[in-house]
């Protein structure tokens, strides 16, 4: 279900980006004499259908690519590792949302950052034998894993 919701979010996001770009082009008079959709696109309104189908395809695939689950090697007992993760995440602007014996969940503090990430800013740390499995947006997960591992090595 989460996958479908993410796909729909990305479809809406891509569509809004298209609307903003077309509006900007029109307001900056970069579309020439074209004032409406049929004159802006070769196939008129059919072009919008083709663009929507392309966005639907990309939106269906994007959650597979954009979200990741990776392992972070954090040495030490549970208390030390948890303290290292919490300190690092606090320094990166994340707030501890939920914590139990096996996992920690973090969200961005800033509302603007959360909106830009379409409320998909949650990073989840699940405890394993040698560290954590980190889940979230791929680029954030990679950046956070490198940072947490470096912080753990310094300590």
Image: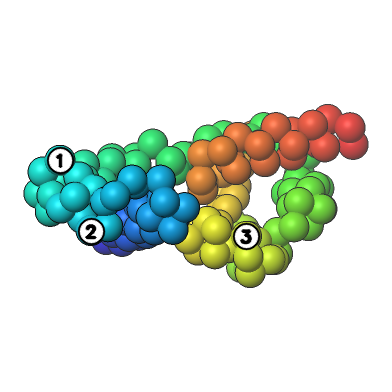
Q: Residue furthest front?
A: 33
> Residue tagged by mark 2?
36
Q: 143 left or right of 116? A: right
Q: Where 50 sits versus 119, above or below?
A: above
Q: Which mark is residue 42?
A: 1
Q: What residue appears at the point 55 percent right and 58 percent down from the top-left corner?
A: 116
| Mark 2 burial class by Cα count in 10 Å: few <14, some 14-19, many 20+ | few
Q: Percent x, y for residue 28?
A: 47, 52
Give the Cα distance between marks 1 and 3: 38 Å
Q: Between label 3 and label 2, give the one nearer the viewer.
A: 2
Q: Which mark is residue 113?
A: 3
First in sequence: mark 2 vs mark 1: 2
Give the Cα distance between marks 3 and 2: 34 Å
Are the two marked residues, 2 and 1, in contact with CB atoms closer than 8 angstroms?
A: no
Q: 30 left or right of 1? A: right
The quadrant of the image that shows the C terminus is top right
């Amino acid at each position: 279900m989460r996958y479908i919701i993410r796909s729909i979010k990305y479809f809406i996001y891509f569509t809004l980006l298209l609307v903003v770009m077309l509006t900007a082009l029109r307001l900056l008079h970069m579309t020439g004499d074209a004032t409406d959709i049929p004159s802006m696109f070769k196939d008129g309104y059919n072009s919008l259908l083709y663009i929507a189908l392309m966005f639907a395809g990309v939106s269906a695939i994007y959650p597979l690519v954009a979200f990741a689950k990776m392992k972070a090697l954090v040495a030490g007992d549970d208390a030390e590792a948890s303290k290292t993760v919490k300190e690092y995440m606090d320094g990166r602007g994340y707030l501890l949302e939920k914590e139990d014996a096996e996992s920690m969940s973090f969200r961005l503090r800033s509302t603007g950052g959360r909106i830009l990430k379409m409320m998909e800013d949650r990073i989840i740390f699940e405890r394993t034998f040698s560290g954590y499995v980190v889940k979230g947006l791929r680029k954030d997960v990679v950046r956070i894993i490198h940072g947490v591992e470096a912080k753990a090595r310094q300590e």
